[in-house]
């Protein structure tokens, strides 16, 4: 037999075997999971929708449910009938309401969903836009025990990366907080508590602007056509329709060191030339999670004096003297650190 | 029933927790006290360690973790101290593996003393860690190291002031020259024995909201674990969502951390024990007075100190039973009973977690930053008071000038190449002589000798062949080829590391590695791979981000290792050198070998890029690289530790794998199946496949059975060739590997086996791109603990190698 042919046949067989038997998204796997999972996924999605409505004080209707699930009228009716039979929901004044059992189930799914999102945000390099869809896919395949493992691994997080609280295993959840950014007035100090991740297009724009829960901002002006605010040194302008998807809580008595950082003269650390000194003001709003923790541990805190020592022959990374040690940072990291140039006399 | 014997002051007893220490892998059977050594990286921590322990040390891993640990011992005034080196970390607040390991040891192992090594030249940064350690434990000594360097830089550090601010003894040392070490020893002993009572500073300066949350939570913790020495710290950890501590609270094992020391406000008198001996034991223990400690009297509990009635046995368990026979165990029993007392209330423990959960919704999302800022602010204040500057000068300038040179646009890269060339030249030139001496000894002298002895004893031929020709010869071969270059290469490498040059190489090359999604330090592990892939896999521990570390592990095999250089050189000089006139042969064959090595570097980058764009796309990643100050390398210590840690461990692993392979090789060549040996049959079966790849059945069989070590591939090929092709006058029989002294004779054997120029080229390529040896694979598995990644590391290069050889062979044949 021609060796070339033999090798090609072998390669083809291997490729086929991989396609069919690959775990997670191989054909065999998908087929096996297929029908049963689909049913479960639809039920769980319906539960989540009902819970969302309840949490926000709205009533879920047949219309809204069918719309969210993208089901035809007949199938939607079937699904609702089945869930009613299972004792997960009851009809009430023209809509549907969760039973206690249904609420428990919904909280379980929401917990898994938000844990996965937290996981993607903290432990992976997955881009923010993929967090939600990826969690949507995995939430239906995760057992409560796996969810608990995940929770332990993440250090029992309390919030998902969109700012929503993660229910406890017992199904506890604090009441909703915050109101839409459009409801604030110029001059308000606001802490972002929630960034709505649907619809996708709006969320993508918010991600691109670096809006994330936990950041502080100061509203500069509110006009019908645009909202201006200052967040971590930069001015951001959003259309109201976008800003309405950002929810914030007023900052009560902001301590001095916690005030919105919008000092004039803030430049990225990467713009500090070799031999020059600068004082750290804070981090850009794009720098968070593990990256931010790492920089903090290295001693790059607001108020720290930093001196650029030398550049790698290829221009990146750049080494800085930080609290007595020489630390190399990549340009992309240095761009996230906002500093203020310091006159040469000050010693670092 | 009164128990006066228990009412002693036990401040002279060890504080460590034996049960937990065993779990943490520390055996305390021969030791009185356990001392932990903590510190930032690059503070001379290992110098202090070596200075304290001398050669009484050994290294290994933390149980179940791929974090290196060194252990050693020393004696002060008759007491034996065990010293455990913790991983060097900047902080204990994050969740990296190193930090977790260090934190767990201080918390759960509860060492009698924690020595915190701080760099006097960078006090503020180092105090960050010191303050965090002092939050966990009371028993600490600060070792203010590198005082000599500080003096040279014109820094005056006031150790007394520092000790007052920190509340623990501070000993100024210069471990490199031995300055201050006696005092350090003495102070450790004082703190361990309780003669010195520390009152460490606890960090304040937190925001009101945070303080409120901490206060209410630590209150709840105190209810659940009334004797816990550091409730505030535990509260902070719980608020930060530390899973280890949450688990310890949940299971009640946190109670094991009750402070064996006596609260200072307790009275000195014995507590009469009432109806409940358990309670009293715990109480008496905690209440035992400072009266005795102030009196300076050393008091050890007697054997009969504890009532061994039924009740004590059932609740106090094993420890109480032991107390009858072991005086020291009495205390352990008392503690454990106090613990069981403290941990008795699961409801209170649940309440702690419940409250922590509630508060965590309130303390908000910037908690970690607030925490870090508070510690650093405190560190800065303390450092400011302790350090007087006299302007920067001296070595500082030298460092800066040297840095400008080694990272300069013009000289940076040439200097690097020069260093690398020198290291290689020293390795090759230096290893030649001992290597051939070892070969003469082990293969040409001992092997025939063993054969003679065996025949004198009338050993049956197959046992003789299996053991001496198979197992012994393979092992001897691996040792002779592997040991000398590794014993030279690794110490040289470690010296450069010690001096501080290697981090600069990573700094210079980071851009290139960044582009393919890897870490600059991979440059170092890649270079280590040129010595030995298995050792290089271990060295990837310097890369602290998991994703980049995996990339470095999987691609390390593309660094042509010490076991493969000889194959490359031999084949190149026979077949490629033979193409050109004799006076060019050397240069051309050398160039072709370098070409193969460069191809390996190229593949490293290509595969890194591929991995970081595909399989590893979603994995976590973070970059940080410290450029430590230059320091004169410690030559003798380096040679000692790098030979012990790197060379001998790897060699041992290789020998373990090579020995059975020798047996397999011998058996395959000697077991007859039909009209030929198994080996001949296998070769026949694989020949067509081998031909398609531009190789041969012999080469494929050699690569399959010589998977334990690349060193024995050529001897196996030669042996198999003689076996199947029958070259008269060479070889030593079926299954006996050999090499020939002259290239001409080797060429004759290989040509008899059907070698052509194409075979040679494909063999060189396949030698670069094939599965790592089994020693390396085992090491990969040990380091990653993942079958999946081990499989990827093995199969990816094989598949690439087969494809590469196939394409080369087909194109070659189509063209010619």
Image: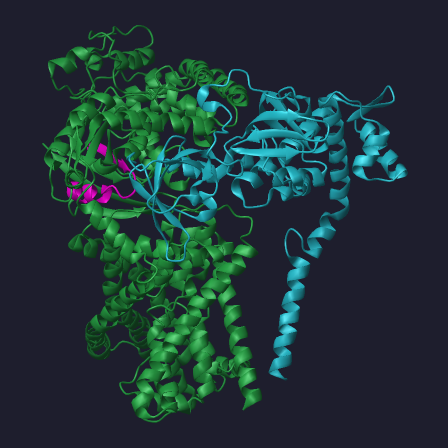
Q: Nearer the viewer, residue B338 or B448?
A: B338
Visible residue check, residue B191: yes
Q: Which chain is green?
A: B
Write the start and end of the magenta stretch as one range. Answer: B30-53
Q: Residue at x 39, y 61 (%)?
A: B776
Residue B414 placement: quadrant? bottom left
Total numbered badges shown on the rendered structure: 0
Quarter of the image where the N terminus of chain B is located: top left
Residue B392, how many percent across, how many down? 21, 40
- Residue B181 in the figure: left or right of residue B680: left
Q: Position of residue B141 (x, y in %)?
A: 21, 29
Q: Going by the picture, which residue comes out furthest to the right?
A: A74
Q: Is residue B35 magenta?
A: yes
The residue lying at 27 percent from left, 28 percent from top is B16
Frontmost residue, B541 versus B73? B541
Residue B423 lies in magenta, yes or no? no
Q: Seen in the image, is A191 located left or right of residue B30?
A: right
Answer whether residue B714 is visible to the viewer in this image: no
In the image, the chain rendered in cyan is: A
Dividing the picture into quadrants, the one containing residue B692 is bottom right
Residue A6 occupies which quadrant of the picture? Answer: bottom right
Q: Residue at x 57, y 30 (%)?
A: A230
In this view, the residue in front, B158 or A50, is B158
Q: Which image quarter is the C terminus of chain B in?
A: bottom right
Q: Nearer the viewer, residue B741 or B308?
A: B741
How far across and down, in percent of the image, does residue B603 sit? 47, 67
């Amino acid at each position: 037999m021609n060796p070339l042919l033999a090798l090609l046949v072998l390669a083809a067989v291997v490729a086929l075997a991989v396609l069919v038997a690959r775990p997670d998204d191989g054909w065999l796997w998908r087929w096996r999971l297929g029908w049963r999972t689909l049913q479960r996924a639809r039920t769980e999605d319906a539960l989540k929708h009902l819970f969302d409505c309840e949490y926000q004080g709205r009533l879920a209707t047949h219309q809204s449910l069918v719309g969210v699930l993208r089901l035809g009228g007949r199938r939607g009716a079937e699904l609702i009938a089945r869930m009613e039979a299972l004792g997960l929901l009851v009809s009430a004044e023209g809509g549907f309401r969760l039973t206690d059992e249904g609420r428990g189930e919904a909280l379980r799914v929401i917990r898994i969903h938000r844990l996965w999102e937290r996981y993607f945000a903290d432990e992976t390099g997955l881009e923010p836009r993929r967090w939600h869809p990826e969690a949507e896919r995995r939430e239906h395949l995760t057992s409560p025990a796996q969810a608990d493992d995940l929770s332990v691994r993440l250090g029992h997080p309390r919030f998902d990366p969109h700012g929503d609280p993660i229910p406890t295993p017992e199904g506890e959840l604090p009441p909703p907080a915050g109101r839409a950014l459009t409801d604030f007035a110029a001059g308000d100090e606001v802490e972002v508590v929630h960034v709505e991740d649907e619809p996708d297009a709006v969320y993508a724009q918010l991600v691109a602007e670096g809006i994330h829960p936990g950041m502080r901002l100061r509203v500069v002006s509110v006009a019908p056509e645009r909202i201006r605010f200052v967040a971590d040194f930069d001015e951001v302008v959003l259309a109201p329709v976008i800003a309405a998807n950002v929810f914030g809580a007023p900052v009560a008595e902001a301590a001095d060191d916690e005030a919105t950082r919008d000092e004039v003269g803030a430049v990225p650390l990467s713009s500090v030339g070799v031999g020059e000194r600068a004082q750290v003001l804070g981090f850009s709003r794009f720098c968070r999670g593990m990256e931010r923790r790492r920089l903090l541990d290295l001693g790059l805190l607001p108020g720290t004096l930093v001196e650029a020592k030398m550049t790698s022959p290829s221009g990146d990374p750049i080494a800085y003297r930080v609290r007595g040690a020489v630390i190399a940072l990549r340009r992309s990291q240095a761009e996230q650190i906002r500093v203020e140039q310091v006159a040469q006399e000050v010693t670092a | 029933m009164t128990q006066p014997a228990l009412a002693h002051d036990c401040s002279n007893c060890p504080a460590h927790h034996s049960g937990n220490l065993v779990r943490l892998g520390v055996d305390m059977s021969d030791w009185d006290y356990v001392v932990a050594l903590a510190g930032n990286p690059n503070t001379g921590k290992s110098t202090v360690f070596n200075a304290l322990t001398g050669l009484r040390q050994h290294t290994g891993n933390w149980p179940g973790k791929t974090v290196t640990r060194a252990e050693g011992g020393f004696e002060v005034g008759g007491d034996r101290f065990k010293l455990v080196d913790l991983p060097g970390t900047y902080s204990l607040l994050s969740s990296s593996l190193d930090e977790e390991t260090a934190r767990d040891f201080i918390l759960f192992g509860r060492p009698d003393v924690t020595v915190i090594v701080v760099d006097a030249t960078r006090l503020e940064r180092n105090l960050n860690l010191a303050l965090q350690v002092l939050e966990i434990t009371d028993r600490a000594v600060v070792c203010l190291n590198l005082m000599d360097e500080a003096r040279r830089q014109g820094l005056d550090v006031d150790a007394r002031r520092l000790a007052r601010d920190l509340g623990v003894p501070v000993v100024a040392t210069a471990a490199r020259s031995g300055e201050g070490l006696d005092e350090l020893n003495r102070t450790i002993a004082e703190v361990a024995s309780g003669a010195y009572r520390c009152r460490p500073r606890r960090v304040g300066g937190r925001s009101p909201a945070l303080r409120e949350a901490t206060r209410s939570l630590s209150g709840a913790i105190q209810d659940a674990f009334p004797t816990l020495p550091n409730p505030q710290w535990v509260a902070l950890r719980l608020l930060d969502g530390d899973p280890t501590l949450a688990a310890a609270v949940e299971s009640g094992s946190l109670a094991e951390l009750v402070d064996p020391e006596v609260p200072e406000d307790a009275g000195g008198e014995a507590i009469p024990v009432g109806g409940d001996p358990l309670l009293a034991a715990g109480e008496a223990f905690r209440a035992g007075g400072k009266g005795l400690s102030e009196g300076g009297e050393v008091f050890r509990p007697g054997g009969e100190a504890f009532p061994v009635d039924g009740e004590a046995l059932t609740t106090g368990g094993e420890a109480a039973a032991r107390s009858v026979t072991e005086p020291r165990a009495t205390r352990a029993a008392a503690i454990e009973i106090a613990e069981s007392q403290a941990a008795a209330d699961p409801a209170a423990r649940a309440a702690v977690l419940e409250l922590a959960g509630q508060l965590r919704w309130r303390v908000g999302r910037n908690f970690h930053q607030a925490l870090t800022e508070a510690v650093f602010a405190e560190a800065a204040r303390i450092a400011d008071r302790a350090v007087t500057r006299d302007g920067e000068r001296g070595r500082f300038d030298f460092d800066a000038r040297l840095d400008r040179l080694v990272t300069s646009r013009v000289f940076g890269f040439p200097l690097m190449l020069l260093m690398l060339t020198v290291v290689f030249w020293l390795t090759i030139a230096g290893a030649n002589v001992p290597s051939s001496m070892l070969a003469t000894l082990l293969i040409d002298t001992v092997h025939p000798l063993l054969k003679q002895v065996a025949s004198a004893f009338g050993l049956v031929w197959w046992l003789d062949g299996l053991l001496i020709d198979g197992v012994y010869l393979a092992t001897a071969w691996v040792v002779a080829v592997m040991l000398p270059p590794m014993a030279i290469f690794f110490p040289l490498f470690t010296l450069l590391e010690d001096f501080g040059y290697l981090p600069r190489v990573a700094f210079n090359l980071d851009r290139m590695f960044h582009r393919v999604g890897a870490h600059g330090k991979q440059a170092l592990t890649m270079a280590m791979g040129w010595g030995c892939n298995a050792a290089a896999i271990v060295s990837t521990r310097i890369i602290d981000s998991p994703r980049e570390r995996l990339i470095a592990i999987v691609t390390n095999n593309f660094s042509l290792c010490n076991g493969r250089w000889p194959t490359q050189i031999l084949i190149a000089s026979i077949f490629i050198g033979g193409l050109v006139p004799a006076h060019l042969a050397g240069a051309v064959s050398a160039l072709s070998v370098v070409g193969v090595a460069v191809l390996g570097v190229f593949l490293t980058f290509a595969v890194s890029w591929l991995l970081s764009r595909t399989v590893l796309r979603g994995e976590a990643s973070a970059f940080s690289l410290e450029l430590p100050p230059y320091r004169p390398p410690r030559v003798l210590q380096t040679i000692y530790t790098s030979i012990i840690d790197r060379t001998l461990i790897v060699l041992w692993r290789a020998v373990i794998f090579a020995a059975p392979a020798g047996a397999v090789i011998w058996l395959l060549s000697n077991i007859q199946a039909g009209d030929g040996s198994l080996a001949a049959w296998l070769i026949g079966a694989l020949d067509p496949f081998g031909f398609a790849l531009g190789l041969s059945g012999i080469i494929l069989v050699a690569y399959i059975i010589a998977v334990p070590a690349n060193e024995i591939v050529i001897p196996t090929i030669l042996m198999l060739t003689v076996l199947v092709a029958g070259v008269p006058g060479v070889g030593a029989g079926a299954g006996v590997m050999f090499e020939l002294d002259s290239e001409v004779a080797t060429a004759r054997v290989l040509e008899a086996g059907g070698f052509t120029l194409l075979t040679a080229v494909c063999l060189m390529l396949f030698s670069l791109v094939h599965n790592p040896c089994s020693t390396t694979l085992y090491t990969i598995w040990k380091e990653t603990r993942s079958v999946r990644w081990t499989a990827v590391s093995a199969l990816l290069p094989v598949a690439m190698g087969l494809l590469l050889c196939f394409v080369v062979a087909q194109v070659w044949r189509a063209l010619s």
